Image: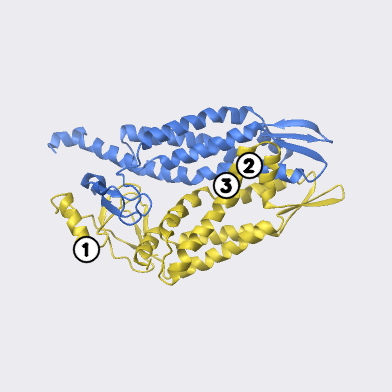
Amino acid sequence: MMTFDSAAARALARCHSCGRVELVEAGHCSRCHAPLHLRKPGSLQRTMALTFGAAILYFPANILPVLRVDSTLNGARENTIISGVVQFWQEGDYPVAIIIFVASIMIPVLKFLAITMLCLGVRFGCWPRALTQLYRVTDYIGRWSMVDVFVVAILVGVVQLGSVMTINAGEGAFAFAGTVVLTMLAAHSFDPRLLWDAAAKNRRHSPARRQKGI
Amino acid sequence: MPIIALEKGRTRRFAGPALIRIAMEIAKLPLLLSCPDCDALFSAPVVRENERVICPRCQANLFSRRPNFVHRATALVLAAAFFFILANVFPFLTLQADYRQSNMHLVGCVSGLDKQGFHLLAAMVGVFTLAAPTLLITALLYVLVPLLRRRRLPWALPFCRAIQEARRWSMVEVFLLGVLVSLLKLGTVATLTLGTSFWALVGLMVCLVAALTVIDYAELWEQLEAAQA
């Protein structure tokens, strides 16, 4: 396997905003004046704190209603995220049920698991390549959870117009939007380079290498 | 796009930071390149047009030089700006119920939530669907249009940084999926038709995504640096 030098080992930092490689001791990027850091500062702590906050908000997001529908035909009804999915499924709208299920239940849960795995990966220094891929997917996919919040916003806006029924947003929608924003921030504050640092440290201390006397 | 190979950064020959700094100051060029995702160090390669550089260790995209990207991106962003104005002017859903017809505009999503007392939620939706795309388009135009004449305006550097930030929080494509879902949700109760604004949003999404894939940030920063202030 090819080995690579890390820029940090040479006291070289990559500018967070413009990508120029400079000596850390310079303090600020000479091109865009952003402060230089070898790694995102406090990355692991921030990621874990934000994920924890998101996990706490995820409970009210699922327990409190997202939508309150009051129609002349069906009477008053409160929908949580899960009951919304179940209702779509029973009415036969399978594609919509699947979209909402994937966006508002599967992605947030998988994202919690993914971020936990990333943090564990930094702790144990294993599978850096696979976990870097996981990081990229996690960072990209988070935004799609917002679908449910947008649906609530659109329904609230549309139904103000007619008189057939009234739709009110519920507190759950706010909690859910909070969860999504916090997990997005958590994924963004994670620094995948920590995975490679930990893996390199692991390799240096591995028994096979120690025997060879490297 | 052909992918070109990378050489490992040859810093081992240097004694320490002092010599690296001297070398960088003499060359006036970024001699070294590090991967944003795994921090592997490389000597900066010569990248020709239509070539792509990926990190051999973690497969991150490092460069992708496309010919004439400033012109192409400017055209696409101008189209996106036009679509965004259309999207805000025209209604995106028309509701027909009880023999009455009413139109809903993009701002309606925010004001509806705001009227029900969900101010913070309204603000979030407003940021994701209105503020972030606006900032993204303005920042792109502010940076790209002067670059056509190899110039840069006084605040070009902070605006260029804002592009990356605004890109993360602009969720036009997610909003479009939301429109489709709510269309199906209300389809049984009332007659809904998609308005001009919906199609403008589709156009906006396509143009923005195309513009952002054409732009290579490393190249953009280099051009900005070389441009006349």
In what element is the residue under mark 2?
helix
Badge number at residue B127:
3
Relative to the observer, which residue lies in front, B141 or A150? B141
Q: Is residue B225 left or right of residue B185?
A: left
Relative to the observer, which residue lies in front, A117 or B151? B151
Say which residue appears at 62% left-offset and 62% top-offset. B83
**What is the chain identity of the residue bearing mark 2?**
B
**What is the chain identity of the residue bearing mark 1?**
B
Pointer 2 local density, CA inside 10 Å: few below 14, some 14–19, many at least 20: many
Quarter of the image for the C terminus of chain A: give it.
top left
In the rendered image, which quarter is residue A131 located in?
top left
Q: Is residue B66 left or right of residue B188?
A: left
Amino acid type, mark 2 = Ala
In the rendered image, residue B5, in percent from the top left (x then y), is placed at 29, 60
Which chain: yellow?
A: B
Q: Is B163 rendered above or below residue A213?
A: below
Does mark 3 fall on the same chain as mark 2?
Answer: yes
Pointer 3 local density, CA inside 10 Å: few below 14, some 14–19, many at least 20: some
Q: Is residue A2 left or right of residue A40?
A: left
**Residue sitting farthest toward the front:** B154
Amino acid type, mark 3 = Val
Which chain: blue?
A: A
* Residue identifier under label 2: B122
* Residue identifier under label 1: B27
**Residue sitting farthest toward the right:** B99
Q: CA distance from mark 2 to mark 3?
A: 9 Å
**Does label 2 or label 3 sit earlier along the sequence?**
2
Amino acid type, mark 1 = Ala
**Does label 1 or label 2 sit earlier along the sequence?**
1
**Does label 3 or label 1 sit earlier along the sequence?**
1
Say which residue appears at 76% left-offset and 43% top-offset. A159
